[in-house]
Image (cartoon, grey):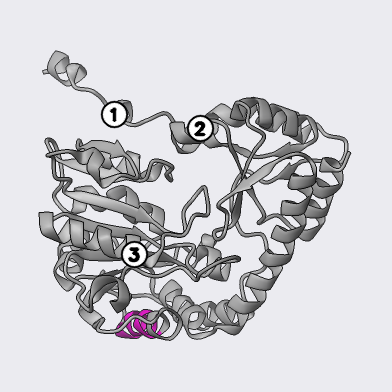
């Protein structure tokens, strides 16, 4: 029995290496700068959680009972109202929304919870948030990183991920492309899941569209899901507030599994989420803060010899000097500026770095000054 158990691979051995571990030495170099590090490597919010959200959390602090996995009706309705008001989504009912404990947990567990496993194929973008690959590995499924539907050949993926606006590149997929992907997936019975966590972080060009927009899906939610997070829009990363919405049948599958696992968003967080979704004023103010930081940093990078690709949305600038990303990381670390190497997001990013503009105004200004020499 002992030998048999030892012969089985540990779950951790099936997973790709955690990429941020490779940044440790560069982080130490950047932190050694006399004026401190300008950490632009992770897109974590640093501005205060909106007062209206904090007040809602405090008011709901007395919460002795278990929450339900499906969540409060008011929480789901707030998500429906926000999607309708801000993103033109129609035809979504309460059975098509499920609150979840942060979008990363959902993305990482989606394949397993939908019964996808060995022998199945999962597709995700060529430049991608690493958790799509992690989710496929946890399920024991094969995965393919590609932006071309023809790359699948005769094989039909069980699940296909879209990410628009994209992390790390900030690319926004146009309406015609989204429609094409929806049609392709429906013809093959592929589940299409769109990670839309940066949908309200747009700066240039056309506004990002949700896969749930009737312009995209023809007025039907069949076979499609969208993942949304309040971490970026509302500075709620610490609250772990997110939701998935779309096809009621797929939401029902997720709900059935999550009930058995006891995956429930805490009641106070649900009340905070309602307050955040109902209030657009704080999101507009935060958008303006990020826009100002982005403009400063973009100009400084361009003056310093970088080219900025895509980056029309999200909270990052996708920058390159036409060299290996690790050289760029090392050179910037010597200036006390820490960025993420594009290689973290796939081979297509080997000559880029991802530069977050979520740091404080003071740290952004410091980075700008260091880039100017």
Distance from disc 1 to disc 2, alpha carbons, whole Å, reads 20 Å
> Residue 15's spot in the image, x, y percent?
33, 31
Name which quarter of the figure residue 220 lies in: bottom left
Q: Measuring from the top left, give residue 235's x and y in whole percent.
A: 58, 66
* Distance in Å between CA atoms under marks 3 and 1: 37 Å
- Give the answer, above or below, for where 178 lies relative to 28: below
Q: Relative to 263, say whether 308 is above or below.
A: above
* Number of numbered callouts drawn: 3
Task: Pinpoint residue 194: horizontal percent, then vertical percent.
Answer: 33, 60
Camera sees residue 108: yes
Q: Which residues are magenta?
A: 73-81
Q: Depth check: give the residue in front, 244 or 13.
A: 244
* Residue tagged 3: 176
Looking at the rendering, which quadrant does residue 62 occupy?
Answer: bottom left
Q: Which residue is mark 2?
A: 343
Q: Residue at x 73, y 60 (%)?
A: 295
Question: Is residue 153 rendered to the left or right of residue 21?
Answer: left
Q: Is residue 281 above or below residue 344?
A: below
Answer with the quarter of the image where residue 174 lies.
Answer: bottom left
Image quadrant occupied by the C terminus: top right
Q: Which mark is residue 14?
A: 1
Number of residues whose C-alpha sits closer than 10 Å to that of mark 3, classed few (under 14), some (14–19) or many (20 or more): few
Are the residues flagged by discs 3 and 1 in contact, CB closer than 8 Å?
Answer: no
Element type at marker 3? Answer: helix
Do callouts 2 and 3 mark residues in contact (Cβ within 8 Å)? no
């Amino acid at each position: 029995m002992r030998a048999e158990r030892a012969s089985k691979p540990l779950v951790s051995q099936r997973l790709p290496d955690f990429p941020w571990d490779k940044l440790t030495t560069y982080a130490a170099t950047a932190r050694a700068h006399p004026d401190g590090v300008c950490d632009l490597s992770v897109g974590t919010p640093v501005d205060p959680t909106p007062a209206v959200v904090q007040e809602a959390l405090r008011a709901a602090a007395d919460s002795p009972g278990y929450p339900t996995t499906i969540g409060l009706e008011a929480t789901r309705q707030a998500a429906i109202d926000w999607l309708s008001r801000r993103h033109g989504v129609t035809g979504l009912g309460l059975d098509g929304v499920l609150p979840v404990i942060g979008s990363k947990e959902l993305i990482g567990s989606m394949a397993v919870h939908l019964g996808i496993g060995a022998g199945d194929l999962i597709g995700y973008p060529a430049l991608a948030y690493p958790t799509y690959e992690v989710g496929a590995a946890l399920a024991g499924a094969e995965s393919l990183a590609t932006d071309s539907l023809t790359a699948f050949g005769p094989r039909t993926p069980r699940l296909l991920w879209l990410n628009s606006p994209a992390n790390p590149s900030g690319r926004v997929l146009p309406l015609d492309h989204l429609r094409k992907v929806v049609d392709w997936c429906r013809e093959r019975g592929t589940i299409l899941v769109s990670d839309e966590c940066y949908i309200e972080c747009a700066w240039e060009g056309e506004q990002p569209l949700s896969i749930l927009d009737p312009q995209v899906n023809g007025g039907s939610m069949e076979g499609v899901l969208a993942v949304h997070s309040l971490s970026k829009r509302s500075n709620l990363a610490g609250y772990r507030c997110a939701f998935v919405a779309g096809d009621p049948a797929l939401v029902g599958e997720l709900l059935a599994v999550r009930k058995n696992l006891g995956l429930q968003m805490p009641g106070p967080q649900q009340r905070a989420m309602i307050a955040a979704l109902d209030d657009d004023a704080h999101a507009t103010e935060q958008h303006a803060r990020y826009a100002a930081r982005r403009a400063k940093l973009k100009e400084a990078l361009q003056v310093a010899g970088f080219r900025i690709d895509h980056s029309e949305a999200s909270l990052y600038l996708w920058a390159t000097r036409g060299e290996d990303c690790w050289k760029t990381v090392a050179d910037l670390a010597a200036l006390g500026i820490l960025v993420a190497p594009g290689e973290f997001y796939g081979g297509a990013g080997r000559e880029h770095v991802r530069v977050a503009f979520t740091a404080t105004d003071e740290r952004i200004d410091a980075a700008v000054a260091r880039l100017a020499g």
